[in-house]
Amino acid sequence: MGSTIDVVVVGAGVAGMVAAVEAARAGARVELISSTELGGGSSERAQGGIAAALDDDDAPELHASDTLRAGRGLCRASAVDVLVREGPAWIEKLAAMGVPFGSEAGLEGGHTRRRIHHVDGTRTGHAVVAALARLIAADPRIDVRTGETVRSLLVADGRCVGALSERRTTVARATILATGGYAALFARTTNPVGSRGDGLMLAHDAGAALADLELVQFHPTVLASGALLLSEALRGEGALLLDAPCGGERFIDELAPRDEVARAIFSRGQAWLDLRPIDRGRFTDLIAALERMGHRPDREPIPVAPAAHYTMGGIVADVWGRTGVAGLFAVGECAATGVHGANRLASNSLLECAVFGGRAARAAVQEPRPKSGARQASSQESVGPTPQLRRALWEDAGVVRDPERLAALERDSSGLARQIATSALARAESRGSHYRRDLPTEDPSLAGHFVFRTNGGPVLEAWA
Ligand SMILES: Cc1cc2nc3c(=O)[nH]c(=O)nc-3n(C[C@H](O)[C@H](O)[C@H](O)COP(=O)(O)OP(=O)(O)OC[C@H]3O[C@@H](n4cnc5c(N)ncnc54)[C@H](O)[C@@H]3O)c2cc1C
């Protein structure tokens, strides 16, 4: 089966849904293809909220300086500038779309102001997805194809002209990849299984560059016995990290940067998050989930440990989502715009999805009509990572990295896993989320991005 439309969007998280809505509003006929239901990636799970400088005591410049500080010298300043300046308008736009943000903004680690806009404590992702889904359902210009996995991109004369799933070929003037990150390649993760980097492989096969693959953020406070995230917003409201379940002591500033908190907990094996000091009524869903699992947050601290959570690396894209391949765009977590540098600031990623998803849509509708004669770039296997590979990535390229283990991972794996190992070896320093036990400090000569182009890599590049 085949069709010709204006814009094909691959992935139906917040980035892909925003791109679809905005492209349709600009008059385009859009096909939105996703392996899961709408929102079925990480977006639906997002708890804490969306960062934006809206209050009187705040300003985009302050949001930018917090973002740059967290990014440890690797943020692309132009992308940060776009993010923080366009952020406030997106909160208002999402509210107008029906997202019921609470009246009081929250605080999270690394932010110097209360600027986390959220819904009912931990339901932000769900609420944003629901609002976008209503708009998509009401727009006849958007065809939704869920339960379909894109296996290959179509290319003609160096341009991307569409995508191929197991069910259909879609020819389009522009293709927007919004396939999410690759944190589910790691055994301990907060992400759904689909976060395995499909979009990165599709784009690379079509000729796009990948960058920052070693930069994986580990969330410090994930239920020790599972994948349930205990949002940073809890610590923002006063939850304490303790070194023992009974009579434990605090051992770190709970709102220190995520990488520092994650390593402090990792070095102890686990820690206990005490939710007794906070107003638990603000986090009803989370508290109910903990109680269903047999925990008693009103009586005892909850055991937590780090897990792979967000991937800064991805498909190299500019502030309009453009990749190096004409007609191919990348937005949301699958993109590497450099906006997060070496460590994403909490709640900047849903904002990234909205800001850059919207911009890519506006640029995509300007692309020329595709010519005929498309061929398929090489196709991706449908199999996901094996449990052994996921364990190897967690153990060899996890919170604390050793060169010997990275070298073994580089030798014994292929595809994205090998590129992660190679980049982590090349980054012979510690910076942001990337921590090398043998090289625990930053090396100023490595303040750039490791990039894989089709002819190999990684090559260190400086981005303006
Ligand atoms: C537990 C959790 C809590 C979080 N909390 C917050 C928060 O409070 N604030 C914040 O800013 N960020 C948060 N994040 C991060 C944020 O949710 C993600 O970065 C963001 O949602 C990514 O959105 P996305 O649209 O790029 O990708 P996703 O939402 O991951 O969507 C990817 C989509 O691509 C589809 N897909 C993938 N491969 C293919 C393929 N080959 N063919 C077709 N479809 C494909 C998937 O089915 C899915 O629909 C959290 C993440 C997690 C996991």
Image: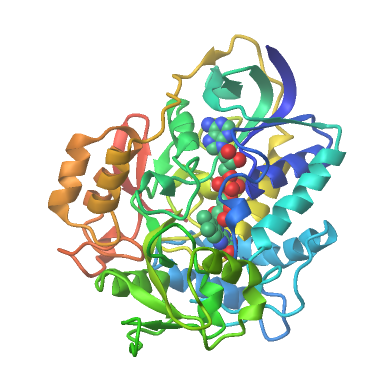
- Can you name the residue that lies furthest to the top here? 373
Tell me if 330 is positioned left or right of 92 in this view.
left
User: What is the x, y in percent for residue 279?
Assistant: 62, 84
Q: Which residue is found at the position 74% from the left and 27% from the top?
A: 6
Q: Is residue 187 left or right of residue 276?
A: left
Vertical order, 109 against 307 (above or below) = below
Describe residue 84's horizontal placement relative to residue 406 as left or right: right
What is the quadrant of the N terminus in the image?
A: top right
Residue extending farthest left: 404
The answer, for residue 444, to whether it is visible in the render is yes
User: Please, is residue 96 above or below residue 449 in the view?
Assistant: below
Numbered disc total:
0
Q: At 31% from the left edge and 71% from the top edge, which residue is drawn? A: 270
Where residue 240 sits: x, y (%)? 44, 84
- Residue at image position (67%, 54%) is 354
Q: In which quarter of the image is residue 360?
A: top right
* Image position of 198 with respect to 46: above or below: above
- Residue 51 visible: no
Figure coloring: rainbow
Horizontal arrangement in the rendering, residue 433 relative to residue 314 (left or right): left
Residue at the image point whose x is 38% and y is 50% from the top = 212
Instruction: Examine the image and state in which quarter residue 162 appears.
Output: top right
Q: Name the residue nearer the viewer: 122 or 254.
A: 122
Q: Please determine whether, in this image, residue 322 is positioned above or below residue 127.
A: above
